[in-house]
Image (cartoon, helix red, strand yellow):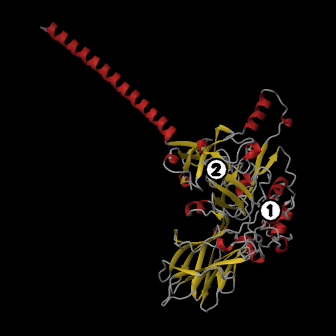
Amino acid sequence: MAKETQKQTNKNKDKNTAEEQVSTVRVMREYVEALGVALVLAFIFKAFVIEAYSIPTGSMASTLMGRHKDIACEACGFQFQLGIKESSEIADSPSAPSITNLWNIWNILWRRTPRENVVTTKIVAGTCPNCYYATYLDKDNTAREPYPSYNGDRIFVNKNVFDFRNPARWHVTVFRYPADPYTNFIKRLVGVENETLQIHNGDIFVMKNGETEFKIQRKPLRQLLSMLRPVNDNDYVVPMIHKIGYPERWQGDKVWGRSEDYRSFRCDASDDETHWLTYQNIVPSSKDWLQLLNHRLPMSQTSGKPQLITDYLAYNSDVTVYGDRMPSEITVADSPRIKDRKVQQIIAKNPGVGQNWVGDLALSCRLNIVSRENMSGSVFFRLVKGGIAFVCEMDLSNKCATFSIPDVPEFKLFAVDLPFKTGGTYDVKFCNIDEELRLMINGKEIDLQEKGEYDALCLPKTKLARDRSPTAADLEPAAIGVKGLTAQVEHLKIERDQYYISCDARMMDMQCDLINSPFPNYEGGIREILTTPSQWSELGKTRVTTFELGKDQFLMCGDNSAQSKDSRLWTSDGIPHYVDRKFLIGEAFYVYWPHGWFIPGTNIALVPNFPKMRWID
């Protein structure tokens, strides 16, 4: 009996063991099957729906970042990105050495090339777009910041979007480069099929098949806001330089008062006169900064003078050193505060001067209207382009906004209702972009029902002709006026529109599209011209380049127009200027990994950078 019981027990154990083995095999099989299904779904998802890409270059800056450095300006604190070209990567950067530097290391270690014969390159400075101070980036910088280089943005791309709709203008698009279909490019689609496109004065004009006139192409609000570039953010003013007498950018009459930190302004206008707070684009050169840092007013010919707003982009402002040799255009400036001769040389270089005048601007601020009984009075926003003022008057008594071009009576004055109460604080943005007036209140665009469009008045030989040049009035391109009430303004910003440089394979000048450029090849002369109205007669007369598009043909341009080899220049490679529909991959829609932050004590950038994750417009 005991033996039978033992046999039964052993049989049960064997059965349990067998069942456990079967169960283990089943679980393992289920895991393998689940993993296989997940991989198949991932491949299907990647092939047909969404795929991740990385941005290698800066042709779409500042919308999308290629390899770059994040910099907080040492003078004003404004944060900006500085692009990294492969030929100018910092040699000893632990985050990602360039191919050139790896080759140099190989030569030193294995081919025994003498170190003195190895030429390394490194970026040693970048210029702030807000105050034009050139921040020194080399290892011996005064802030002791490492200024590491980061890889470009990583993005998601919707690959099946074109199965449901046609490619859309102004959308950021990924495609295979026609000259090398194994290489993917990313640009903004600016031209669609069956149209003739022109680039003129930084804008895009289109004539559809069967039409006889070119019409300007306006950006939807999301794309417009994404493509605005900083000119001045008054939250990052440098009070020190103004306390010693350097002119302020925002200046008002005696009724206007400002805060001690120079960041906000208040006007108590009890009379019927309009009192103006006016912006002037006064930016110190790097040579001026050498004097200002030592509490001395600079004495150069252009110091303290307002200048025209141009298409300068900080992303392109790198100053590169080859070995121990400084670039030839850098000059030495005497500074008792800065003893290091090399640092003096770097700070004396300021690449932050664009050569294309930009008159399409946006003015924004936080407007605080002090409450009163029987509120009356008005607040004015004014932008100037080509000597012509464009005005938005906010009438507080009637709670409406009136838009006008005072010097052009042909423009029909019109008014719209505003969401204003008696007093209160409002975020206001007034734009004169793409030959259209636009207004936003608290982040929401006011519907002007296309009444703000004035392109029909921009014919040749008229006051609003597109080839008109700037005048002395453009030295005060933005202003805020107050009449009959008390108001305070802060968070003042001036931004400019995207500027597409007009060029093609025959005209390879990607820096300036003037027909007769007055600019010499050295920086001092450029600044002098930008501050002198008598030199501006040719500044509105730019080249016009034309591109024809047939069925399933699309034109692509980079947002960083001065550093983008796009449709404008492809014919130099022996290929058409367009992208055929068969080469289109999809639309970029989200930056899921801008770049990570470094794990403390390591060179591994894996800490998520949540603030810069964003939708792509």
Instruction: Give SS at disc 2.
Output: loop
Which of the 4 image quarters holds residue 40? top left
- Per the image, the residue denoted by label 2 is 550
State the separation of the CA atoms marked 1 and 2: 29 Å
What amino acid is labelled 2 in the image?
Answer: Gly
* Number of marks in the rendered image: 2
Quarter of the image for the C terminus: give it: bottom right
Residue lying at 63% horizontally and 57% vertically, measured from the top left: 209
Task: Give the percent coordinates (x, y) of residue 23.
Answer: 31, 23
Instruction: Give SS at disc 1.
Output: loop
Front-most of residues 75 and 22: 22
What amino acid is labelled 1 in the image?
Answer: Leu
Which of the 4 image quarters holds residue 262? bottom right
Residue lying at 56% horizontally and 77% vertically, measured from the top left: 367
Residue 318 visible in the snapshot: yes
Front-most of residues 510 and 191: 191
Q: Decide: is 370 above or below 533.
A: below
- Looking at marks 1 and 2 on the same chain, the residue that comes earlier in the sequence is marked by 1
- Per the image, the residue denoted by label 1 is 514
Q: Decide: is 37 above or below 564.
A: above
